[in-house]
Image (cartoon, grey):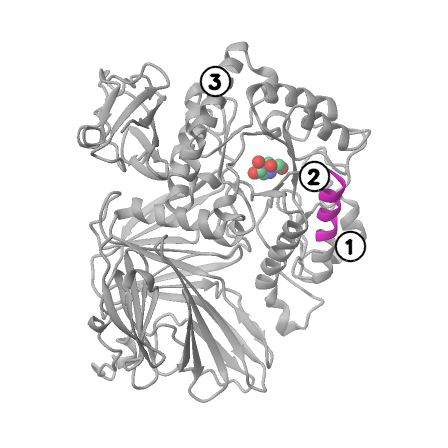
Amino acid sequence: MRRIFLCLAITGFTLALPLSAQSIQFDQARKLWLLTTAHSSYAMGVAPSGQLQHLYWGPALWRIADVPAASPRADVSSFDPHEMLENEEYAGWGGPRYYEPALKITRADGNRDLVLHYVSGNTDGNKLRVVLKDIRDEIEVTLSYTVYRETDMIERSAAIRNRTKQQITIESAQSATWYMPPGIGYRLSYLSGRWAAETQLNREPIHEGMKVIESRLGHTGHNFNPWFAIDDGSAEETHGRVWFGALAWSGNWRFSIEQTPYRQVRVTGGLNTFDFAYPLRPGEILQTPEFYGGFTDSGFGGASRCLHDLERTHIAPHGLSARLRPVLYNSWEATEFNVDQQGQETLADKAAKLGVELFVMDDGWFGERNTDKAGLGDWFVNKKKFPNGLDPLIEHINKLGMDFGLWVEPEMVNPDSQLYRAHPDWVMNFPGRPRSELRNQLILNLARDDVKEYIFSVLDRLTTEHKIRYLKWDMNRTFSEPGWPEEKPEAQRELWVRYVLNLYDIIDRLRAKHPNLEIESCSGGGGRVDLGILRRVDEFWISDNTEAYDRLKIQEGFSEAYAAKFMSAWVTDVPNTNGRTTSLKYRFLVAMQGALGIGANLNKWLTEDTELATKMVTLDKRIRNTVQNGDLYRLLSPRTNDVTANQYVAKGGKEAVLFAFRHAQQYKTGVAPIRLEGLDPRATYRLESIDRALLEKNSVLSGAYLMGNGISLDLIDDYDGTAVLLHRVE
Ligand code: DGJ
């Protein structure tokens, strides 16, 4: 590797260091920081006024001297004050500032002006902390930066501290503002959707004005996902400049994407300002969620791979030492609420024969839970269904060589439950107003510490008393009437934040006490998919829609931000969700692009189904390391092609796998050769087709040919699918 040496002035010393060793450089004379990852740099500096200005975000720089010092701009007119032209790194709402502020407060006396200036900075390895303070009052903000050099990502957050003697109320607490280089012609990519149609990818031009994507639902939500990508207008999957980010928060969140009249393009994100009012008493701190950002010139594919690496390395529990996701069976679509010992054992016997490693019993095992009308909250086993409790079933499953997983929905209660009858005050509510039920359920006010402790004790008891390896943690409705009558009126809106913090606290304590426990985040499908919950869970359930063709698009959107390892994907029976019927092979191939699960009614399967499924599970175990831990290349998108193709390349490049799907053929036209990516052009690869679809005559081909010409596949039927494994030969 070429090593560049440069002189750095750090706290008075002058050091000669190779650039590759230094994630954070500080030019003390000009009060300027340069944060550098493997392929990107980010710079900010302090202007003579004390204002902290953003200076650069783009390809990696090796020379801090190139970055101009922060400097004041001149007013353009009395309508265009200089504050609007300066890229303030973390702007308070005060003075003549009209763009989206990062922090907005009201003091006890009604004074709302807040202007933040630099106080100090401190670097510790790959972490930087910069303290800002109001120009008059002891209202302080500590900005935190962590540089993840290998994964090309920067983590940002803000801690707001009230050092005054008066209470203040925070009306907006954002994690960060990100600036693109000044310009026009940018495009925004974001994920939107609804229940059973989550993570649909949108790409649209950014014009002057503001676009908001957000959740006001209490949880992350099905409607938007806290991820964005902005490109310079010309990026594609394989190349082009993309700035992107994702927020680690599972409650109300908000991104505002602005283009100002001064050609600034800025994204401000953090806690949603909707119905937000957070009192900060003297001495208190509000810590915002982490907002991760990255830059790549390797297109949208490159952006996704950075996030995937970050998630696997630094976000998800156990990091790179986490085990590969096992093949899972879940009983929900087979039985719905009709679970009982005999029925589950029969399914388990069949699942074990297929090679399943984790058997999950879904809803219906507890209280009077025979429909969705009753029982939520009563987390004790239903003795009519399981006369001797859960243990005989768990032992049966363990004897078959599988781990046992259990469905819970701890945040919820049905009015028809023992828990609600005992504690009607535990749900969020506005006294004297209706309590809106959705799916016949109400939400426990997890912001209350007594409710939090109760839920922790219930889950702790379950996981202590039974050999439960895995919890499917469900959450099946949005918030409504988010009242907290026991609190003082001015503190009641803390609920939006405290609910999430208490949720995190329960899971953190549970995992600390039961280190082997794994958790799936489910919220009626993909309603709680974000980096905040990913810190605490091993998989996401990304949609209740398990129809394979619909799923291709949902999975594509998910993959923009999240790695395949965290994408639980089931093979289910047909017709499903939208009435479409596809072959079992097609359904397996779609699901094998994530963490494979089976959610079908195995009692209805024919011998040939079982035989095929056994082969596919065996195949999945061969390729899952490549899929779950490898680099994803989205070769052909279901949004724009009649063929979808995704390729995964194992780290180190020894193995790769291509999945290809034909949606609908017309006129018997064949599929054009599919060009691969991410291979070594100088290496050769042995091709292994899982069926007869591979048309190549040569079974060994070079990376140069595979990427230059591509491979031809015989996908001629509607909803046809195949996979090709590549093994590096030399
Ligand atoms: C919604 C989930 O998304 C489903 O997979 C299933 O667990 C049901 N809830 C059970 O009520």
Establish whether ligand 1 lies closer than 8 Å to the Cβ of label 1.
no
- Assess whether residue 620 is covered by the magenta stretch: no
Mark 1 or mark 2: whose residue is earlier in sequence: 2
User: Residues under labels 3 and 2: Cα distance?
Assistant: 40 Å
Residue at point 40%, 60% (across, down): 255
Dots 3 and 1: beta carbons under 8 Å? Answer: no
Is residue 611 found left or right of 489 in the rendered image?
Answer: left
User: Which amino acid is tagged 1?
Assistant: His
- Residue ID for mark 1: 423
Residue 726's spot in the image, x, y percent?
32, 26
Query: In front: 684, or 266?
Result: 684
Crowd rating for badge 1 (residues with CA inside 10 Å; few <14, some 14–19, many 20+): few
Mark 3 or mark 2: whose residue is earlier in sequence: 2
User: Which amino acid is tagged 2?
Assistant: Lys
Crowd rating for badge 2 (residues with CA inside 10 Å; few <14, some 14–19, many 20+): some
Residue 5 is marked as none
- Residue ID for mark 3: 615
- Camera sees residue 341: yes
User: Which amino acid is tagged 3?
Assistant: Lys
Crowd rating for badge 3 (residues with CA inside 10 Å; few <14, some 14–19, many 20+): few
Query: In front: 143, or 556?
Result: 143
Between circles 3 and 1, the one closer to the viewer is: 3
Is residue 219 found left or right of 8 in the rendered image?
Answer: right
Span highlighted in magenta in the image: 456-467
Which quadrant: the C terminus?
top left
